[in-house]
Amino acid sequence: MAISDVAIAGRAARAAAEVLLRLRQGDITGRPLGDAGDAAAQAAISASLAADVPGDVVFSEEAADDLRRLSAERVWIVDPLDGTREYGDPARHDWAVHVALWSGGELSAAAVALPGLGEILVTDPAPVVPASPGGRMRIAVSRSRPPAEADTVAAALGADLVPLGSAGYKAVAVVRGEVDAYVHAGGMYQWDSAAPVAIARAAGLTTCRLDGSPMVYNDPDPWLPDLVVCRPELAEPILAAVRAGR
């Protein structure tokens, strides 16, 4: 029986998660561990996708841009290790593995592995977003470079900023109910958000650019510098606060 695209994504993400966890049990940490993890996870995902879908194109942070993707029907957008810095710190779990399929002009299947938590989120069956706990809104932001736009939104809506690690982890933190929104500006690539955005969409969350326009993937330019992921009822208040702040 043919394997589904979601299962292919999950298998590739799991393969990377397994090698990353094994490496983490060794005696290297910090940047050397991150570099080793990038290479090992890329190899694991490449081998998994080559075995399952040898004719598909892979667009990965850790490989040269294969421009065949611009005319291909199926393109896997991959970040083998999202959050190299966090991965290099044994105490941190806020890093991820991203595997997404772009086909028919849109993200069609994805998996995000959270190896530090032993979880893999997929687009089908989609995760169920926990009910809002009420109280003040919680907005995920970068631990090292929280954007001014997030400060603006927090001030306008009476929200708390929650520093978290990798881009992918912050996006799926909304899916997992750890926060209510993720507001990012200042730099990101397609592979940083493709799989988490696909998961968030499948779960019924709103995903868009800071100006409200849709996220576009497999574009010739890999740069896709800003992102909002939030509960649907928060989308307009967040975007209105961003507009007012500009």
Image: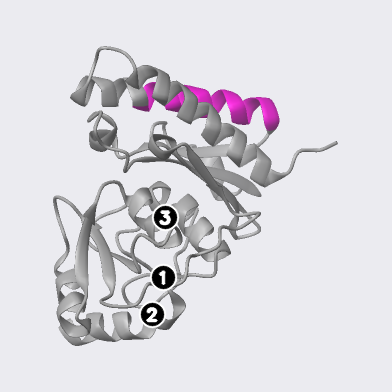
Q: Mark 3 points at which residue?
A: 172
Q: How far apart are marks 1 and 2 (CA)?
A: 9 Å
Residue drawn at the location 60% of the way across and 40% of the way down: 9
Q: Position of residue 199 (x, y in %)?
A: 52, 56
Instruction: Assess disc 1: are there few (<14), some (14-19) or many (≥20) residues with their C-alpha within 10 Å of its C-alpha.
Output: some
Q: Distance between the residues labelled 1 and 3?
A: 15 Å
Residue stretch rendered in magenta on the structure? 38-52
Q: Looking at the image, do the residues carrying marks 1 and 3 touch, with CB atoms under 8 Å apart? A: no
State which quadrant residue 128 falls in: bottom right
For marks 1 and 3 on the same chain, the one whose residue lies earlier in the sequence: 3
> Residue 46 magenta-drawn?
yes
> Residue 101 magenta-drawn?
no
Residue drawn at the location 19% of the way across and 75% of the way down: 154
Q: Mark 1 points at which residue?
A: 208
Q: In this view, does 14 lie to the left or right of 4?
A: left
Instruction: Assess disc 3: are there few (<14), some (14-19) or many (≥20) residues with their C-alpha within 10 Å of its C-alpha.
Output: many
Query: Which secondary structure lies at badge 3?
Result: helix
Q: Mark 2 points at which residue?
A: 235
Q: Which residue lies furthest to the top in this view?
A: 27
Q: Position of residue 227 (x, y in %)?
A: 34, 64
State which quadrant residue 80 falls in: top left
Instruction: Mark 1 vs mark 2: give the one in front.
Output: 2
Q: Which three-letter amino acid code belongs to the residue tagged 3?
A: Val
Query: Which secondary structure lies at badge 1?
Result: strand
